[in-house]
Every structure is written in structure tokens, then in C-alpha cells.
Image (cartoon, rainbow, N blue to C red):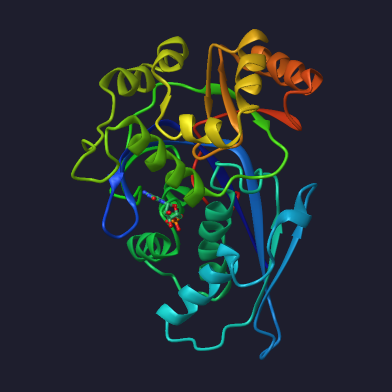
Amino acid sequence: MITVRVPAKVNVQLGVGGLRADGYHDLANVFFAVALGDEVTATAATPGEGVTLSCSGPDAAAVPLDDSNLAARAARLLAAHHGLAAPDVRLHIAKAIPVAGGMAGGSADGAAALIACDALWGLRTPFETLLELAAELGSDVPFALVGGVALGRGRGEILEPLPVGGTFHWVFAVADGGLSTPAVFRECDRLRDEAGTGSTDTEVPTPDADPALLAALADGDAVALAAALANDLQQAALSLRPALADTLRAGTEAGAIGALVSGSGPTCAFLTKDADSAAAVAEALRASGACRTAHATYGPVAGAGIPA
Ligand code: C5P
């Protein structure tokens, strides 16, 4: 039995370029791994049992347990890569990352399943190969393997680790229900067309990482990072879910120094000045009624791995 711990992510910068011919958008995506995470346990199954999934945690009912789950797809992809036609494994997901929340929880479980199955089956797959398999599973899966803070280019899968000068303290406000990532990207394109700027990759400039944001990360400077937080999908998420504006306001009024929608949402992320402030902001958000629940956490942390 192998248990792997895997972090959620928040995008401290999510620069979205135009729509490409392949349906993706070029990104300048600064991923940041936080301690809020899932655990995926792989247990040997009897031959012929196939890949089975179970899930625990307060939101377990919202997690699909069919073949759309990235953990199951990861197990099959890894097996196929090694020429194993019909793999057998029981995968259990202990779910803490908000489901369909913009924190790459499904991607995290895919990354964790790659590591867990690789260890359970004794495959010793090179990390570079795991990264390639992860990119096949989804744009956010490679980062869940790498962790820390990294700049993601292309559709987010081409990663460059970034230096970070300290620990940052975060609060995540979880909304009722999720948002579909493709729907939020589509809304971003629609808003750009409506504004007359165009939405294709020939019309929208390729985004780049913000030097002020990179300096804030390298310096461990929370106030400077708060000022540089930016998400090009935020307007689209707010357009689909206007109530998120109240959530962002509630966190800021409670003392957060920075606020943004996490990825494609609807989870809202708040940067705070220290751990005590994060606990107080989380408490105020839970009491405010502006979200379903709120979690205080910190980062950066390592990517998917077997805890020591
Ligand atoms: O790669 P992944 O399967 O996670 O992407 C889900 C969807 O999100 C894509 O089908 C696409 O609609 C959108 N997406 C995008 N540009 C990216 C990443 C994702 O448009 N860079």
C-alpha cells in the first residue's frame, strides 16, 4: 500500500493569451503549491479486478468515480506506457482540495496516482517521463508533480521552477458548487470579443510573467506579492458567478492584503501577512456567509510525494 500526498495550487499570476487552433490558450501561469492537499492511496488488487476508485472527505459525493477521474486515467496511462494492458489497483482519494474549485484538485489526484502506482508496481519510471505522462493527462498535472512555485508556459505544462524567499500565508474561500474550466475560458473569449479586442492568438498578445511579481516571490515579500496578484480569468469567473465579488470583498474587509479568484474559480484566494492573520481571515469568512467554508493554509510546499 502506497500513500502519496499532493498539494493544491493557486495561480498568483494567470496571464491568458488568445485562443489557439487546438482549443487551448497560451498562458503565463505562475503556479504556487499550498499545503492544503489530497492524499491518494494505491493498494494492490486481485488480478482481473481492474482500476477501482473510492473517495472520502466532506465533498466526496462530488468526486466522479468513473473513468473521467484523472487518478484512474493516470493509473491506466502509466500501465499502458509500460505495456501493461489490464492493470489492477485500488485507488482511494482522501479529498481536501475543493472539487471543481480552480485549485487543480483533479489534476493533483492524477499526479498522485502516477507516483503511487509507479511505486506500488515497482516501475521506477524516470521523473521526466512522469512529467510527459502528466502533460498528456491535463495542463495542470505536471505542476502537481513539481510543486513549489513555477512558471507554466504553453498551455501551462512547460514548467520553469522559480525562486521563493519565504513562506506565504493564504486563505481559500470555498463556494457552493464548482465552475467548469472550459466554460470559464470560453467566457473569457466571449468577453474579449464583446470588448472588441478579439480573442484569438493572432489578436491577443502572448502573456509574460510580471517582473514585479517574480521579485516579490524571490524576496518573500507578501505585501509586494499581494499588489502583483493577477488573474486574466477572474473577470470571466465573476461574469459567470457575480456573487464571488462579495466573497472577495468579505476577505479584504476581514484583513487580507490581497484577493483573487483561484484559477478558473470559484474558490477565492486571499493572501495574508502572517499565520495569525490567515486564521482570523478564515474565521471571519466562515462567519460572513459569503462562502461555504474557508481554509487557512501556507506555501510553497513540495509536489506529489510519499511522506517521509
Ligand atoms: O488541459 P486540461 O484538460 O486540464 O484543460 C481543460 C480545458 O481547459 C481545455 O479543454 C480548454 O478548454 C481549457 N484550457 C485552455 N487553455 C489552457 C488550459 C486549459 O483553454 N492553457
Number of marks in picture: 0
Instruction: Indicate whether 289 appears above or below 239.
Output: above
Residue 261 rendering spot, x and y as whole percentages: 53, 30
Quadrant location of the N terminus in the rendered image:
bottom right
- Whether residue 131 is visible, yes or no, is yes
Q: Could you tell whether 228 is left or right of 7 in the image?
A: left
Q: Could you tell whether 294 is left or right of 180 in the image?
A: right
Residue 194 rendering spot, x and y as whole percentages: 37, 35
Q: Residue at x 46, y 10 (%)?
A: 223
Q: Residue at x 67, y 91 (%)?
A: 48
Given residues 245 and 44, the one toward you in this image is: 245
Residue 110 rendering spot, x and y as whole percentages: 54, 60
- Whether residue 262 is visible, yes or no, is no
Q: Could you tell whether 270 is left or right of 22 in the image?
A: right
Residue 61 rendering spot, x and y as whole percentages: 78, 56
Q: Residue at x 22, y 38 (%)?
A: 206
Given residues 307 and 165, the one toward you in this image is: 165
Instruction: Indicate whether 257 appears above or below 91.
Output: above
